[in-house]
Amino acid sequence: MPEPVREIEVEVLPPDPASDVRAGAPPQAGPTIYTRAADGSREPKFNDPFIALVSRLMDNAFVIPGTNIRFGLDPLIGLLPGIGDSATALTSLMLFLQSTKYGIPKIVMVRMAINVILNTTIGALPVVGDAFSFWFKSNQRNYDLLCKHAAAPGTSTKSDWLFISALAGGLFLVLAATFIAYAAVAATVVRFLIGR
Protein backbone atom coordinates (compact mmCIF):
# COMPACT_ATOMS: atom_id res chain seq x y z
CA MET A 1 0.00 0.00 0.00
CA PRO A 2 1.51 3.38 -0.96
CA GLU A 3 2.68 5.67 1.85
CA PRO A 4 0.39 8.66 2.51
CA VAL A 5 1.47 11.86 0.81
CA ARG A 6 3.40 14.22 3.09
CA GLU A 7 4.34 17.82 2.56
CA ILE A 8 8.10 18.36 2.55
CA GLU A 9 9.75 21.62 3.57
CA VAL A 10 13.44 22.42 3.30
CA GLU A 11 15.14 24.93 5.58
CA VAL A 12 18.81 25.82 5.30
CA LEU A 13 20.06 26.10 8.86
CA PRO A 14 23.48 25.73 10.48
CA PRO A 15 24.01 22.27 11.98
CA ASP A 16 22.49 22.09 15.44
CA PRO A 17 23.05 18.84 17.35
CA ALA A 18 20.14 19.68 19.67
CA SER A 19 17.68 19.53 16.76
CA ASP A 20 18.52 15.98 15.71
CA VAL A 21 15.88 13.27 15.71
CA ARG A 22 17.55 11.31 18.49
CA ALA A 23 20.02 12.51 21.07
CA GLY A 24 23.50 12.05 19.67
CA ALA A 25 22.44 11.59 16.04
CA PRO A 26 25.04 12.80 13.52
CA PRO A 27 24.82 16.54 12.77
CA GLN A 28 23.29 17.35 9.41
CA ALA A 29 25.71 18.83 6.89
CA GLY A 30 23.12 20.29 4.57
CA PRO A 31 19.49 21.34 4.47
CA THR A 32 17.34 19.97 7.26
CA ILE A 33 14.44 17.98 5.85
CA TYR A 34 11.12 18.18 7.67
CA THR A 35 7.97 16.19 7.08
CA ARG A 36 4.57 17.53 8.06
CA ALA A 37 2.50 14.90 9.81
CA ALA A 38 -1.28 14.67 9.58
CA ASP A 39 -1.65 16.68 12.81
CA GLY A 40 0.35 19.56 11.30
CA SER A 41 3.47 19.05 13.41
CA ARG A 42 6.90 19.21 11.81
CA GLU A 43 9.50 16.63 12.72
CA PRO A 44 13.06 16.46 11.42
CA LYS A 45 14.24 13.09 10.16
CA PHE A 46 17.63 11.60 9.32
CA ASN A 47 19.04 12.71 5.98
CA ASP A 48 22.28 12.13 4.09
CA PRO A 49 21.90 14.28 0.94
CA PHE A 50 24.50 12.35 -1.09
CA ILE A 51 23.14 8.85 -0.38
CA ALA A 52 19.57 10.11 -0.80
CA LEU A 53 20.34 11.68 -4.20
CA VAL A 54 22.21 8.68 -5.63
CA SER A 55 19.59 6.22 -4.31
CA ARG A 56 16.83 8.29 -5.91
CA LEU A 57 18.68 8.52 -9.23
CA MET A 58 19.32 4.77 -9.27
CA ASP A 59 15.83 3.64 -8.23
CA ASN A 60 13.12 6.34 -8.39
CA ALA A 61 14.21 9.20 -10.68
CA PHE A 62 11.55 8.67 -13.36
CA VAL A 63 7.85 7.92 -13.44
CA ILE A 64 5.90 6.12 -16.14
CA PRO A 65 3.40 8.73 -17.42
CA GLY A 66 -0.13 8.16 -16.23
CA THR A 67 0.95 5.80 -13.44
CA ASN A 68 2.57 5.89 -10.01
CA ILE A 69 5.24 3.42 -11.15
CA ARG A 70 8.72 4.81 -10.57
CA PHE A 71 12.09 3.55 -11.79
CA GLY A 72 15.64 4.80 -11.95
CA LEU A 73 18.90 4.39 -13.79
CA ASP A 74 19.67 0.97 -12.27
CA PRO A 75 17.57 -1.15 -14.66
CA LEU A 76 18.50 1.09 -17.61
CA ILE A 77 22.25 0.87 -16.99
CA GLY A 78 21.82 -2.86 -16.39
CA LEU A 79 20.76 -3.24 -20.02
CA LEU A 80 24.31 -2.42 -21.17
CA PRO A 81 26.02 -5.77 -21.88
CA GLY A 82 28.96 -6.57 -19.63
CA ILE A 83 29.56 -3.26 -17.90
CA GLY A 84 26.00 -2.29 -16.92
CA ASP A 85 25.55 -4.73 -14.04
CA SER A 86 29.11 -4.08 -12.85
CA ALA A 87 28.53 -0.32 -12.76
CA THR A 88 25.26 -0.56 -10.82
CA ALA A 89 26.80 -3.07 -8.38
CA LEU A 90 29.76 -0.79 -7.70
CA THR A 91 27.39 2.13 -7.13
CA SER A 92 25.38 0.06 -4.62
CA LEU A 93 28.60 -1.07 -2.89
CA MET A 94 29.79 2.55 -2.64
CA LEU A 95 26.48 3.60 -1.05
CA PHE A 96 26.66 0.65 1.35
CA LEU A 97 30.18 1.59 2.47
CA GLN A 98 29.14 5.25 2.84
CA SER A 99 26.25 4.14 5.08
CA THR A 100 28.54 2.31 7.51
CA LYS A 101 29.85 5.59 8.95
CA TYR A 102 26.53 6.10 10.78
CA GLY A 103 27.08 3.19 13.16
CA ILE A 104 24.01 1.23 12.11
CA PRO A 105 23.49 -2.15 13.84
CA LYS A 106 25.28 -5.17 12.40
CA ILE A 107 22.07 -6.99 11.54
CA VAL A 108 20.94 -3.99 9.48
CA MET A 109 24.26 -4.02 7.61
CA VAL A 110 23.66 -7.70 6.84
CA ARG A 111 20.22 -6.86 5.45
CA MET A 112 21.70 -4.06 3.34
CA ALA A 113 24.47 -6.33 2.04
CA ILE A 114 21.94 -9.02 1.13
CA ASN A 115 19.92 -6.42 -0.78
CA VAL A 116 23.02 -5.53 -2.83
CA ILE A 117 23.91 -9.20 -3.42
CA LEU A 118 20.37 -10.05 -4.54
CA ASN A 119 20.16 -7.09 -6.90
CA THR A 120 23.58 -7.89 -8.37
CA THR A 121 23.23 -11.64 -8.83
CA ILE A 122 19.63 -11.70 -10.04
CA GLY A 123 20.18 -8.46 -11.96
CA ALA A 124 22.91 -10.17 -14.02
CA LEU A 125 20.31 -12.46 -15.60
CA PRO A 126 19.19 -11.21 -19.03
CA VAL A 127 15.71 -9.59 -19.11
CA VAL A 128 14.54 -11.21 -15.84
CA GLY A 129 17.32 -9.46 -13.93
CA ASP A 130 16.45 -6.04 -15.30
CA ALA A 131 12.80 -6.59 -14.41
CA PHE A 132 13.89 -7.61 -10.90
CA SER A 133 16.03 -4.45 -10.53
CA PHE A 134 13.07 -2.38 -11.75
CA TRP A 135 10.92 -3.84 -8.96
CA PHE A 136 13.42 -4.51 -6.12
CA LYS A 137 15.08 -1.05 -5.85
CA SER A 138 17.92 -2.18 -3.58
CA ASN A 139 19.45 1.29 -3.15
CA GLN A 140 16.18 2.81 -1.98
CA ARG A 141 15.56 -0.14 0.35
CA ASN A 142 19.01 0.38 1.85
CA TYR A 143 18.50 4.12 2.26
CA ASP A 144 15.18 3.48 4.01
CA LEU A 145 16.97 1.06 6.38
CA LEU A 146 19.69 3.66 6.99
CA CYS A 147 17.13 6.37 7.79
CA LYS A 148 15.34 4.07 10.20
CA HIS A 149 18.41 2.77 12.03
CA ALA A 150 21.01 5.55 11.87
CA ALA A 151 22.76 5.75 15.21
CA ALA A 152 24.99 8.24 17.00
CA PRO A 153 28.49 8.73 15.61
CA GLY A 154 31.38 7.34 17.63
CA THR A 155 29.43 4.31 18.86
CA SER A 156 31.31 1.90 16.59
CA THR A 157 33.83 -0.27 18.39
CA LYS A 158 36.84 -2.09 16.99
CA SER A 159 34.73 -5.24 16.57
CA ASP A 160 32.15 -3.23 14.57
CA TRP A 161 34.85 -2.05 12.17
CA LEU A 162 36.26 -5.59 11.85
CA PHE A 163 32.74 -6.78 11.08
CA ILE A 164 32.25 -4.04 8.48
CA SER A 165 35.60 -4.85 6.83
CA ALA A 166 34.86 -8.58 6.72
CA LEU A 167 31.35 -7.97 5.39
CA ALA A 168 32.59 -5.54 2.73
CA GLY A 169 35.34 -8.00 1.75
CA GLY A 170 32.85 -10.86 1.49
CA LEU A 171 30.48 -8.68 -0.52
CA PHE A 172 33.32 -7.73 -2.87
CA LEU A 173 34.24 -11.42 -3.36
CA VAL A 174 30.65 -12.38 -4.16
CA LEU A 175 30.36 -9.48 -6.62
CA ALA A 176 33.73 -10.38 -8.21
CA ALA A 177 32.68 -14.03 -8.61
CA THR A 178 29.42 -12.92 -10.23
CA PHE A 179 31.27 -10.69 -12.70
CA ILE A 180 33.83 -13.40 -13.51
CA ALA A 181 31.04 -15.89 -14.20
CA TYR A 182 29.22 -13.32 -16.33
CA ALA A 183 32.42 -12.56 -18.30
CA ALA A 184 33.07 -16.28 -18.82
CA VAL A 185 29.58 -16.78 -20.26
CA ALA A 186 29.99 -13.73 -22.51
CA ALA A 187 33.41 -15.00 -23.71
CA THR A 188 31.93 -18.41 -24.49
CA VAL A 189 29.13 -16.83 -26.53
CA VAL A 190 31.64 -14.66 -28.45
CA ARG A 191 33.87 -17.69 -29.18
CA PHE A 192 30.84 -19.61 -30.36
CA LEU A 193 29.76 -16.78 -32.68
CA ILE A 194 33.27 -16.25 -34.08
CA GLY A 195 33.78 -19.98 -34.58
CA ARG A 196 30.71 -20.23 -36.83
Image (cartoon, grey):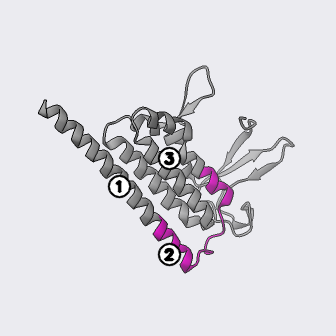
* Magenta region includes residue 164: yes
Can residue 91 be seen here? The reply is yes
Q: In terms of image quadrants, where is residue 128? A: top left
* Residue 177, numbered label: 1
Q: Could you tell me the amino acid type at mark 2?
A: Leu
Can residue 104 be seen here? The reply is no
Residue at the (56%, 49%) spot, across then down: 52
Mark 2–mark 1 distance (CA, rounded to whole Å): 22 Å
Q: Which residue is mark 2?
A: 162
* Residue 54, numbered label: 3
**Mark positioned earlier in the residue sequence (2 or 1):** 2
Tags 2 and 1 touching, CB below 8 Å: no
Rendered location of residue 56, percent (x, y):
54, 42
Between circles 2 and 1, the one closer to the viewer is 1
Rendered location of residue 39, percent (x, y):
87, 43
Q: Residues within 10 Å of mark 3 (few under 14, many from 20)?
A: many
